[in-house]
Structure formats: structure tokens, C-alpha cells
Image: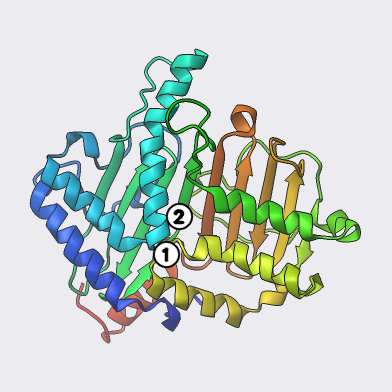
């Protein structure tokens, strides 16, 4: 696929319309704040991070109650139902992390933990035919959307993490915001034969974090691990289930189209690789790579109780493919005036 070919399977008019309506409501609440809305071409649109620090946008803590409601509504209409639960749980986990650090003495001065320290920002004008986008970014949640021609939606990079991965103290002890990300991956590993594990486990030591970090863009690496074509039917089902954990973070409309694209690209070439120990509590990492996508997951920090997980699209991160087509049409006089 060239960058000027618009992928028809990225068309998601219902999601685009719902996002535009919700974003307009949020603009109406806080649009006067000069931290909130920027030109679509602003280079900071491509900046994201999953670590705690000040970033572009207005944090929930600085919003009125009605603005917070509007912000969380924008989040809700932009993801699948289960992903919305996860995002809210991850945000709430900041209070749990603060309690853990107070008990363990591991807190760091100047690094407050706050469920309201999540930043919302809009680029361009929601709705209409010109490209626009929005982002929610904070500790362990980063969702980045690009909308083109009112119906094409790019949803990556998409990041969820959790610290702790499992709450150890208090009324929420045992709670896990991201159980499927860990359990489905480990279930696939344990379903492999010993010979298959020799292929799927290229390194007994897990990396300390996801390999792509918070890079603006990523490029395909050499596939590592075992291919889906090498698996039997029950094992294949497990790998498909693992991919769906990430695809289904999207709205049903987008997830259905994304899965069709993955199938069209060829499932047999998808690879699964696990690094680190196989048991609960061992530092571990896995990656799932297809012709156009990359999933990375790690749980290595804080005694293997700290998850990072990301979905990247080599072609459509930040809507690059859709924007290429949009601007090519415009310059040729077939699209919208600029």
C-alpha cells in the first residue's frame, strides 16, 4: 500500500461522528483555555508518552465538573466498552499507586500520583471535512486519534499500562486493570510444545520496557518468534484471542474493520515472541507482529508488577496513510480547498 491509498477499512463514520459531537461539547466547556486547542499541523500532535510528566492539553484536575464529564464522554465514545473500563481503572490506579509508594517508601518528590492528571487536547476543529484529532495522555494511558474527511479514523498509537499490575494493599487488593493482556499471552505460551517454545522464546531475559518506547513512528523489524502458520488450531485460536485483546480496545466499528484488514494481510505470517520467564512473577515481555501492526507488552518493573502495552500501526499511526491521500487529492484539485 502506498501512502496515497486511503484504506477503505479505516472508514468509521459512526465513530467519527460521535467523536466530533463529544469533542465539540468539550470545546464548548474549555475551548477558551489556550492549552487545549491547537492547529492540526502543530508538531506536538505527534508527541505522546506513558510516563508521568506535564504534557500538552488541559488536565482533568483543571476542569470544571461539567468539563470533566464532557472529557470522559469523549473517551467513552472513542473506545470499546471494555477499553473504557480499563482506561478508567488505570486512571483510578494512580491513587492506589500513591498508597503503595507511601507504604513502601518508594515515592519520589515532585512526582505526584493523581487520577485527575490526565491531559486532553484537540488539534484542528472537530467535525467538518478538514483533518482534526484529539489525544488523552497521562501516566499509563495514551490514546491518539486522527479523523479525516469526517469518516476515516486512525487510532494509534494506543497505550495502556498499570502500576501496580495487581493491587497489593487495601480494599482493592488483588484488583488487576489489565488481566487479559497478561493472562492470554501467558496462556498461549503454556499451550506451546517444548519444540515450539524453542522458537517462540528467543531470549530468556526480558527487556526492561517496550522496545519502541514512545517513538513518534515505528518501522517493521525482522519478525521474531513463532508464526501463526506453525500453530495447531487451538494454539492459533489463542493467538487470535491475544490480538483481539488489543484490537477490541477500539470501537466495535473500527475493531471489525481492523480485524478484516489483519485477515486480508495474512494471519499466517503473524509472529509471537516471548522473552523472560514463563511463570507469574517472572519478568516477561511479548511481541506480536504482523505485516502492518506491532503489539508490545512487558511486565518487568517493580518486581514484575508493572505493565506496559502498546498497539502500533506501521502504515496508519497518526493517520499518515489517510492524510497522504487527503492532501494528494486536495493538491490535485479533487478534494477540499486548503
Q: Is label 1 in contact with label 2 (beta carbons under 8 Å)? A: yes
User: Can I make out residue 272 in this image?
Assistant: yes
Q: Position of residue 309 (x, y in %)?
A: 54, 48
Figure disc tally: 2
Going by the image, does 210 lie left or right of 318? right
| Classed neighbour count for the residue bearing mark 1: other residues with Cα under 10 Å, few (<14), some (14–19), many (≥20) | many
Where on the picture, by quarter, is residue 79? bottom left
Which quadrant is home to the N terminus?
bottom right
- Give the answer, above or below, for where 138 lies relative to 201: above
The residue lying toward the viewer, choosing from 338 and 178, is 178
Kindly report the distance in space between the C-alpha atoms of the residues bearing marks 1 and 2. Answer: 9 Å
Q: Position of residue 308 (x, y in %)?
A: 55, 43
- Give the answer, above or below, for where 99 lies relative to 79: above
Residue pictured at 79% horizontal, 70% vertical: 231
Furthest-bottom residue in view? Answer: 334
Q: Circle 2 — which element?
A: strand
**For residue 250, which numbered disc appears in the image?**
1
Amino acid at each position: 500500500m502506498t501512502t496515497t491509498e486511503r484504506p477503505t477499512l479505516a472508514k468509521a463514520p459512526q465513530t467519527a461522528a460521535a467523536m466530533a459531537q463529544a469533542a465539540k461539547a468539550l470545546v464548548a466547556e474549555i475551548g477558551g483555555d489556550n492549552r487545549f486547542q491547537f492547529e492540526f499541523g502543530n508538531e506536538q500532535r505527534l508527541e505522546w508518552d506513558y510516563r508521568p510528566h506535564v504534557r500538552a492539553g488541559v488536565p482533568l484536575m483543571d476542569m470544571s465538573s461539567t468539563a470533566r464529564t464532557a472529557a470522559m464522554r469523549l473517551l467513552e465514545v472513542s473506545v470499546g466498552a471494555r477499553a473504557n473500563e480499563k482506561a478508567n481503572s488505570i486512571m483510578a490506579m494512580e491513587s492506589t499507586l500513591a498508597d503503595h509508594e507511601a507504604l513502601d517508601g518508594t515515592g519520589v518528590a515532585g512526582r505526584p500520583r493523581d487520577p485527575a492528571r490526565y491531559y486532553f487536547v484537540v488539534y484542528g476543529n472537530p467535525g467538518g471535512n478538514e483533518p482534526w484529532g484529539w489525544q488523552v495522555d497521562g501516566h499509563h494511558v495514551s490514546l491518539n486519534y486522527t479523523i479525516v474527511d469526517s469518516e476515516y479514523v486512525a487510532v494509534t498509537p494506543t497505550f495502556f499500562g498499570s502500576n501496580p499490575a495487581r493491587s497489593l494493599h487495601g480494599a482493592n487488593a488483588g484488583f488487576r486493570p489489565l488481566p487479559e493482556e497478561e493472562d492470554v499471552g501467558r496462556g498461549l505460551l503454556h499451550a506451546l510444545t517444548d519444540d515450539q517454545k524453542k522458537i517462540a522464546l528467543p531470549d530468556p531475559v526480558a527487556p526492561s520496557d517496550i522496545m519502541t518506547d514512545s517513538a513518534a513512528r515505528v518501522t517493521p523489524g525482522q519478525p521474531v518468534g513463532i508464526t501463526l502458520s506453525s500453530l495447531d488450531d487451538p494454539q492459533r485460536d489463542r493467538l487470535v484471542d491475544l490480538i483481539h485483546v488489543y484490537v477490541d480496545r477500539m470501537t466495535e466499528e473500527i475493531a471489525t474493520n481492523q480485524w478484516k484488514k489483519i485477515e486480508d494481510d495474512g494471519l499466517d505470517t503473524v509472529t509471537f515472541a516471548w522473552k523472560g520467564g514463563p511463570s507469574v512473577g517472572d519478568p516477561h515481555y511479548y511481541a506480536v507482529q504482523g505485516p502492518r501492526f506491532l503489539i508490545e507488552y512487558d511486565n518487568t518493573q517493580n518486581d514484575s508488577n508493572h505493565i506496559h502495552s502498546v498497539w502500533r500501526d506501521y502504515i496508519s499511526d497518526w493517520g499518515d496513510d489517510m492524510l497522504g491521500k487527503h492532501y494528494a487529492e486536495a493538491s490535485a484539485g479533487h478534494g477540499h480547498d486548503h
